[in-house]
Amino acid sequence: MAVNVYQHVCPSREDRLGSITGYAGTLKELTGRGLKGCLRNRDRCFNTSGQCAHFDALDQLAAIVDSVVIDHAPQGCATGYIMWNTFGRRLAPMIGKKPRNVNVISTRMNETDIIFGASEKLKAAIKFANDRYHPKVIFVTGSCTSGIIAEDIPSVVTEVQQEIGVPIAYCSCEGIRSKMWSSGFDAAQHAMVKTMVKPPRRKSKNVNFVVFWPTVDAFLKPALARLDLEPLYISGLTGPENHEFASESVATVGQCGVLSSYYGGALQEHFGVPFLQEHFPYGISGFESWYMNLAALVGREAEARKYIEEQWRQYGPEIEKLKSKLKGVKALVALGSGMAFEIVHILRDLGMEVVHAVAFHYDPTLDNNDGKINHIAKYAEDADDLDVSVADSQQHELYKLLLKHKPDIIFSRAHGSNIWGVYLGISTVEYGSASHALYGYAGLAELGNRIVDELSNRNFVKLIAKHFVSPFSKQFDNMENFAYLEKETAE
């Protein structure tokens, strides 16, 4: 799948990758049909929750140091950055940086703007942002409102950039263009690559690591140092200089396939930087495969094997003890597709039984996959099958899955998923995007210990469950799990 960074608009995941938000079945069926190109999305007759691609694009761009985001939208569309600003301020000291506020300016489109257009207002906002903040780069985000009235943002960007001389990029992240909030990551990275990445001057020893926040240094830096490599973070709390010569790096890897797909695909397509997407550095087999594949690019397989052996001697005994403690513990996973199935194999590495996995969406392939097997399909090929569903945070389905499977613990992140576990007396673990747990053997041991801690004292969730009154009727509780999911039809 080619990535065209020269066009104004980044195609949605539905159009570019064939991604879906509705499915119920097994993992092997999901990936098998996806690789054959015959996976069809199953719609729902209603939604209980959701998130907008605009929200994620705005947050990703605002977190770049020395940038300003002009949100060409009604003022309510920019409120999501408040949460991201809080995250950034809290995490900055963890990596030795001074807390800072993000710079976001809303054009506050109103009824008059919708009728007559707001190009002049947008021009004024860009010039005001440049005069006030003196940024190194300016991003202009589109919205449902600007998209519906067909505001010509690219022309405004071109005109003002010639006047002020600062790089300006248009990010087409209108929420109506995609049902998947992850399309916002792609739209933001499209703007990043188009504006900040330059052609390579020479080859460096850097490895691009695409992640929400650069808080994984404790794992990544020593691991890469053994291969004579260094991390280059493509993340929040880093500036345009990190993007500038990402084209010179040895490879692009990332936190997950969802977050790294577009950026990694673009660098591979336009600059020949290999994008490693079959494995991620989690669990036992995942870390080992990821590390050996990276080492193979620089001819340091012997050093990689030695490092893996050293790490296992240090953490292996603890992991084996955790396996004995967690053997037979039942878990349910509900996460974005980039992490859901990674967590499945991590929990299985710890001896746990995963009864069901919910992915908030599913990508049959990743950018510039060239027909190769991706990380989810690779795992499905090698592992035991599993009941799975795909749902963009449909809480009514998750509630019924918990009633059906009665897991000992739920592993999730965001969108209110974990709260249903607490209501039903089920221990929960929140996977945080800034956490360094999961990475390598050390992360696996840390996660295992956290799960043991959660299971060792369940008084809180038991007390909550005792007083919980379900908002759903008995009739709903007795319905089939996916009653509101469109039925399968003959191909």
Image: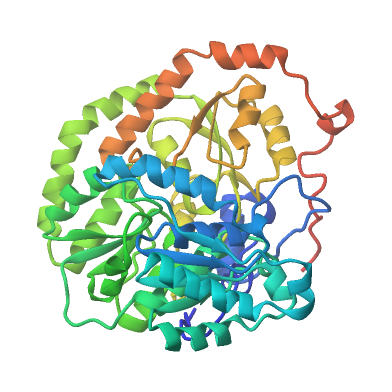
Where is residue 456 drawn, in percent x and y?
A: 45, 14
In percent of width and height, residue 442 lies at: 26, 36
149 or 421, which lies in front? 149
Q: Is residue 372 visible?
A: no
Residue located 47% across and 80% down the image: 3
Figure quadrant of residue 130: bottom left
Inspect this view and state whether residue 310 appears.
yes
At horizontal 73% and vertical 73% (from top left) the residue drawn is 113
- Whether residue 219 is situated above or below residue 295 in the rendered picture: above
Quadrant location of the C terminus in the rendered image? bottom right
At horizontal 45% and vertical 52% (from top left) the residue drawn is 379
Residues 131 and 275: in front is 131
**What residue is rendered at 86% in x and 26% in y?**
474
Q: What colour scheme governs how the chains and residues are painted in the rendered image of this protein?
A: rainbow
Which is nearer the eye, 477 or 214?
214
Image coords of residue 256 (percent x, y)? 42, 55
When the figure is inspected, residue 182 is found, relative to residue 204, above or below; the finding is above
